[in-house]
Image (spheres, rainbow, N blue to C red):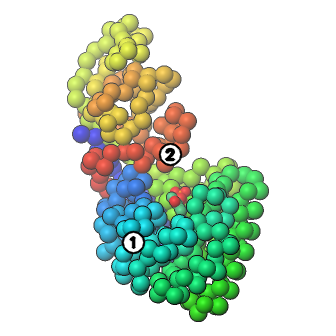
Amino acid sequence: MAEIKLHLQNLYSNLSILAKKAGGKEKIIAVLKDNAYGHGLDIFARKTADFGIIHAITRDAKEALEIAPFFADIIVLSEHKENFFTHPNIIFAINEFSALKSVPRGAKIALKIDSGMHRNGLNPEEFDAALSAIKQSGVILHSVFTHYRAADEIGSCFFWQRENWRAVKERIIELAKKYGINKPFFHSCNSAALLRCGEFDEDFARVGIAMYGYCDLPEAFGHFDLKPVLELFAKRISTRELKKGWRVGYGGVYEADKNMVSSLYDVGYSDGILRYNGQGELKTTNGSLILGRVSMDSMSINSSEEKISIFNDARVWAKHFDTISYDVLVKLNAKIPRFFV
Ligand SMILES: *Cc1c(COP(=O)(O)O)cnc(C)c1O
């Protein structure tokens, strides 16, 4: 089977850069949703905690419970309201006003605010009623947060949304006073927003992709020495000689332009790599050509190495498929063995 090597030095180097920018390890919330962006939830959580990260984010409560022993607190981003529960270090994001009714007394919440992305979150008109309801129901307001729609793009949009967010924070602080609620923490920045903002002045930054070693900010925002953590390997199943003119694999899309070696490797689209259809050139880490269409469980490569690195930089595949590194990473099948080196 394929295997995934996770480069610990790269992870720690990325985390050091991010912690420095945020003003301390305790300001970083490690975003570990969706199997830690395909890196493997459990092992990745342990290593980030070993580094000194104390806050995390997951997508659902199941993921949060799995890593609860490693962190001081974990925010669950998109659990359904029927599944809310009380737990000493699990915090449920509230993505709409009506979800507040479903929070049990004593449970911890993080209130999501719509500051311009219009995907989810409470609107300013709902703030007063929300804080009043929180006070009355004995729910613990851990934090108030928002998400930027264009943190990684040049333009005025980010500044416009930051202004909206500034007003939100002032209003929430006023209302917390009015209802006698402890001042909540505030957080708004993802990786791109943290890296591009001048002075970071919030309680936390929610860092995902940059911790894994990627940031696709335009050059104008500066250079950040992030290093990809994940490297995907495949093992050789068989090797053969291709004669000039032979065609390889489904549809015979690749035609050998000379006699050459071809080996079949044990990774395919069932393992979560995107299905290369043989159009355009796609190469492995060491520059070996992938020959023709990727099959379900295998692919042909112009190589005879026992073990081959398919990629150590997801941007190569992201670029080929006109998508983003997140998309390449997060799809990697959870069954693939993962280990740190
Ligand atoms: C996924 C996510 C993040 C992390 O974003 P990156 O771009 O990977 O840093 C932060 N906040 C929220 C709400 C998210 O859903």
- Verify CB contact (< 8 Å) between mark 2 and mark 1: no
289 displayed left or right of 240: right
Asked whether 33 or 266 is in front, the reply is 33
**In the picture shown, does residue 225 fall above or below 99?**
above
Task: Tell me the crowding category of disc 2: few under 14, some 14 to 19, or many 20 or more residues within 10 angstroms, Cα based.
Answer: many
* Residue lying farthest to the top in this orientation: 245
271 displayed left or right of 152: left
- Which residue is rendered at x = 37% and y = 27% of the image? 294
Q: Give the SS element for disc 1.
A: loop
Asked whether 50 or 186 is in front, the reply is 186
Q: Nearer the viewer, mark 2 or mark 1?
A: 1
**In the picture shown, does residue 107 fall above or below 219?**
below
Q: Give the labeled residue for mark 1.
A: 84
Whole-percent x and y of residue 212? 46, 56
Q: Which mark is residue 73?
A: none
Q: Give the SS element for disc 2.
A: helix
Give the residue type that dot 2 points to. Ser
- Which residue is rendered at x = 75% and y = 53% of the image? 155
How far is disc 2 from disc 1 in space, using C-alphas? Answer: 32 Å
123 displayed left or right of 92: right
**In the picture shown, does residue 24 fall above or below 339?**
below
Q: Give the labeled residue for mark 2.
A: 325
242 displayed left or right of 24: left
Give the residue type that dot 1 points to. Phe
- State whether label 2 is within 8 Å of ligand 1: no
Task: Tell me the crowding category of disc 1: few under 14, some 14 to 19, or many 20 or more residues within 10 angstroms, Cα based.
Answer: many
- Which residue is rendered at x = 55% and y = 36% of the image? 322
Question: Quick check: can you spot residue 321?
Answer: yes
